[in-house]
Image (tube, helix red, strand yellow):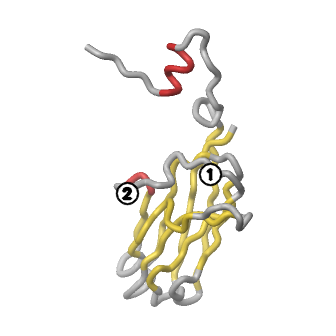
């Protein structure tokens, strides 16, 4: 029967001599960015809501978006936008096409089939951004938490 070893397991326990493992992969410090906003009215198409900053070299582990019923229509993405605009951004890296209409709810990155943002290591400070890809029709509340590991 074959045995398989992860990259970091191999570095630490199989290779002779062993290799150091990046602290953000093993024994790193878990941190959260949490923010919320009470929306006084509808959010128009392509409007952005900035919900904190993730630091350079952070490795993203989870993202959660909680929302009240934002009306009869509304779809949002959750991603990041680099503070340094010369670096690449991904507006839906954490959550794509979240239906924020008709009922309150919570969506997690780990529940998605395609988790582009999972394990993403940022090459620069980045804003957490919720973007309306379909306009909402009502006031309400958004709450956001992004979990990351940093040495």
Residue 109 versus residue 138 in the image, above or below? above
Q: Secondary structure at mark 2?
A: loop
- Residue where numbered disc 2 is placed: 112
Q: Quadrant of the C terminus?
A: top right
Residue 125 percent coordinates (x, y): 71, 57
| Crowd tier of the residue under label 2, counting other residues whose Cα lies within 10 Å: few below 14, some 14–19, many 20 or above | few
Residue 148 percent coordinates (x, y): 60, 47
Residue 49 percent coordinates (x, y): 61, 75
Residue 96 versus residue 44 in the image, above or below? above
Residue 14 percent coordinates (x, y): 50, 13
Q: Secondary structure at mark 1?
A: strand
Tell which of 13 and 17 is nearer to you. 17
Residue 131 versus residue 65 in the image, above or below? below
| Crowd tier of the residue under label 1, counting other residues whose Cα lies within 10 Å: few below 14, some 14–19, many 20 or above | some
Q: Quadrant location of residue 150?
A: top right
The residue positioned 54% from the left and 14% from the top of the image is 15
- Residue where numbered disc 1 is placed: 32
Q: Residue furthest right?
A: 84
The residue positioned 41% from the left and 71% from the top of the image is 97
Tell which of 100 and 88 is nearer to you. 88
Q: Residue furthest top?
A: 16
The residue positioned 74% from the left and 64% from the top of the image is 84
The residue positioned 45% from the left and 90% from the top of the image is 137
């Amino acid at each position: 029967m074959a045995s398989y070893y992860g990259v970091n397991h191999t570095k630490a326990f199989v290779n002779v001599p062993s290799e150091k493992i990046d602290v953000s992969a093993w024994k790193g410090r878990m941190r959260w960015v949490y923010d919320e906003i009470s929306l006084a009215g509808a959010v128009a198409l392509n409007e952005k809501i900035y919900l904190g900053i993730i630091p350079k070299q952070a490795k993203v582990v989870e993202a959660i978006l909680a929302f009240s019923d934002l009306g009869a229509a509304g779809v949002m993405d959750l991603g990041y936008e680099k503070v340094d605009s010369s670096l690449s951004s991904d507006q839906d890296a954490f959550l794509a096409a979240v239906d924020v209409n008709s009922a309150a709810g919570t969506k997690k990155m780990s529940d998605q089939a395609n988790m582009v943002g999972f394990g993403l290591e940022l090459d620069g400070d980045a804003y957490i951004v919720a973007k309306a890809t379909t306009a909402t029709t009502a006031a309400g509340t958004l709450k956001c938490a992004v979990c990351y590991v940093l040495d």
